[in-house]
Image (cartoon, coloured by chain):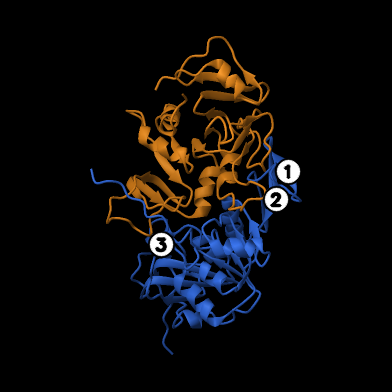
Chain colours: A orange, B blue
């Protein structure tokens, strides 16, 4: 049994550091906001133009002029600010945002990521993903270790059209925490509780580095 | 002759604001999703029947609102956007080849608008390097990192929407409805601003202006704003 989506988010939240500005993508990354560790002050950026994004509004307080990049109604925290899309991506390209968490369809052992297009299917667009992955200093991918057909999403090379090259630093899946060393591949840092190194080896198609005893995650 | 000491940008309504808009033009539309879109101008363009429009807009609206209205009537020839996923008619026209689509990374889209208004013909960005977005584009390495050359847009018309504006064309936005509107206002040769509240000059504090009136050629008081919410998401009362 691997981690639930919420537990993946919980593990990623342990990576947050005091004073960071953080951009969360759609899906599992959004759940990270529910697990901010005690004593850590961070602000969430949404690329449509807000810093200091708060939780969803209570019913009756939705504001059409206040949404996140997923077009969901949100609230603004005390100390929040609004700005244009150009300023927003200046924050991202200019590396003023310390952490980006996003989902992926595939990640390669060199840190390439594919998460925007499946050939033959309706293409919706990359949104801000290419800008985010090309610029962020610290990118964590949150995803399932395998796809619905049971095939590994951690590959030696992505088969789908790329979103960015050599950019992902860390991957947290339902089975493991892995750091990407472009020279060596996926370095296994932690296992999900009850998941064996063998299972992770079996479900990782890209180069996997296992060093010594790999500890279980602390959740 | 009386002197006002400001340059009035006021036009009577959305229809008057479209003077000079012709078929086959490239037109910018502010907004992110349905947030901060120029509702009145879109409706007026639909009524005017302008066709062959190349739209520069982050999104393409939904089936029955926003730019979806101009897709229904097949007034749009090409869409330049970063994300277009919320619209069945869009998908149908794209798959049938009736509609051309050029997908651009969102930050690059914003900067190509900003550059157009700021007199920067092109710029280098890391976004899209190594992907199909970079195909055919010049690559240069700065500080050890590869970047691709992107060009400023060229748009004869831009339609933006603000919360408040004055007769001199100064604009103030509310919340995340600002998004692409300021850069598109800068980029348009003719920028039409529609506002929820049009006030006399002097009523807005100059310290609060988001877009100075120099970037706005026409302004009008909008009416009947629907301000539809695309994803109404709420939490339980604690």
How many marks are shown on the rendered structure? 3
Name the residue that disc number 3 marks.
Answer: B173
Residue B149: mark in rendering: 2
On what subunit does the disc labeled 1 rest?
B
Name the residue that disc number 1 marks.
Answer: B140
Residue at image coords 62%, 65%: B93
User: Hey, which quadrant is residue B230 in on the image?
Assistant: bottom left
Q: What element carries label 3?
A: loop
| Residue B65 in the figure: left or right of residue A198 | left
Mark nearer the N terminus (2 vs 1)? 1
Mark nearer the N terminus (3 vs 1)? 1
On what subunit does the disc labeled 2 rest?
B
Does A66 appear above or below A217? Answer: below
Q: Indicate the position of residue B135 as horizontal and vertical percent values.
A: 74, 49
Q: How far apart are marks 3 and 1 (CA)?
A: 37 Å
Near mark 1 (Cα within 10 A), the count class, few <14, some 14-19 or many ≥20, is some
Q: Are discs 3 and 2 less than 8 Å apart at CB?
A: no
User: Do the dots labelled 3 and 2 sit on one chain?
Assistant: yes
């Amino acid at each position: 049994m691997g981690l639930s989506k919420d537990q993946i988010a919980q593990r990623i939240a342990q990576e947050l550091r005091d004073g960071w500005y953080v951009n969360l993508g759609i899906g599992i990354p959004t759940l990270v906001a529910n697990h901010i560790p005690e004593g850590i002050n961070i602000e969430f950026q949404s690329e449509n133009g807000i810093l200091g994004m708060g939780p969803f509004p209570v019913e009756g307080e939705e504001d059409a002029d206040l949404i996140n990049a997923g077009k969901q109604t949100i609230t603004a925290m005390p100390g929040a600010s609004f700005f244009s899309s150009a300023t927003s991506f200046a924050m991202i390209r200019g590396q003023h945002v310390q952490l980006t968490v996003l989902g992926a369809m595939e990640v390669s052992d060199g840190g390439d990521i594919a998460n925007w297009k499946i050939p033959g299917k309706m293409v919706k667009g990359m949104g801000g993903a290419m800008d985010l992955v090309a610029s962020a200093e610290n990118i964590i991918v949150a995803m399932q270790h395998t796809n619905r057909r049971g095939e590994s999403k951690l590959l030696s090379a992505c088969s789908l059209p790329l979103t960015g090259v050599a950019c992902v630093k860390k991957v947290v899946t339902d089975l493991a925490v892995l750091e990407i060393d472009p020279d060596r591949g996926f370095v296994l840092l932690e296992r999900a509780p009850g998941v064996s190194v063998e299972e992770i080896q079996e479900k990782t198609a890209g180069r996997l580095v296992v060093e010594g005893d790999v500890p279980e995650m602390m959740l | 002759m009386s002197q006002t000491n400001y340059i009035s940008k006021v036009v009577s309504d959305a229809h008057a604001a479209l003077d000079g808009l012709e078929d086959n033009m490239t037109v910018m539309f502010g907004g992110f999703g349905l947030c901060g879109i120029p509702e009145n101008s879109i409706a007026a363009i639909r009524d005017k029947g302008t066709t062959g429009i190349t739209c520069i807009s982050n999104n393409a609206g939904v089936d029955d609102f926003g730019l979806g209205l101009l897709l229904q009537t097949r007034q749009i020839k090409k869409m330049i956007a970063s994300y277009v996923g919320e619209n069945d008619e869009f998908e149908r026209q794209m798959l049938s080849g009736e509609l051309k689509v050029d997908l651009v990374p969102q930050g690059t889209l914003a900067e190509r608008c900003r550059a157009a208004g700021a007199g920067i013909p092109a710029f280098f960005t890391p976004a899209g390097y190594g992907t199909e977005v970079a195909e055919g584009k010049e690559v240069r390495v700065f500080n050890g990192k590869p970047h691709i050359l992107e060009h400023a847009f060229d748009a004869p018309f831009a339609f933006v929407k603000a919360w408040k504006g004055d007769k001199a064309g100064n604009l103030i936005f509310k919340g995340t409805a600002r998004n692409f509107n300021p850069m598109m206002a800068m980029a348009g040769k003719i920028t039409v601003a529609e506002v929820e509240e049009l006030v006399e000059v002097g009523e807005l504090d100059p310290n609060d202006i988001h877009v100075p009136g120099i970037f706005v050629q026409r302004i009008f008081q909008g009416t009947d704003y629907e301000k539809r919410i695309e994803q109404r998401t709420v939490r339980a009362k604690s």
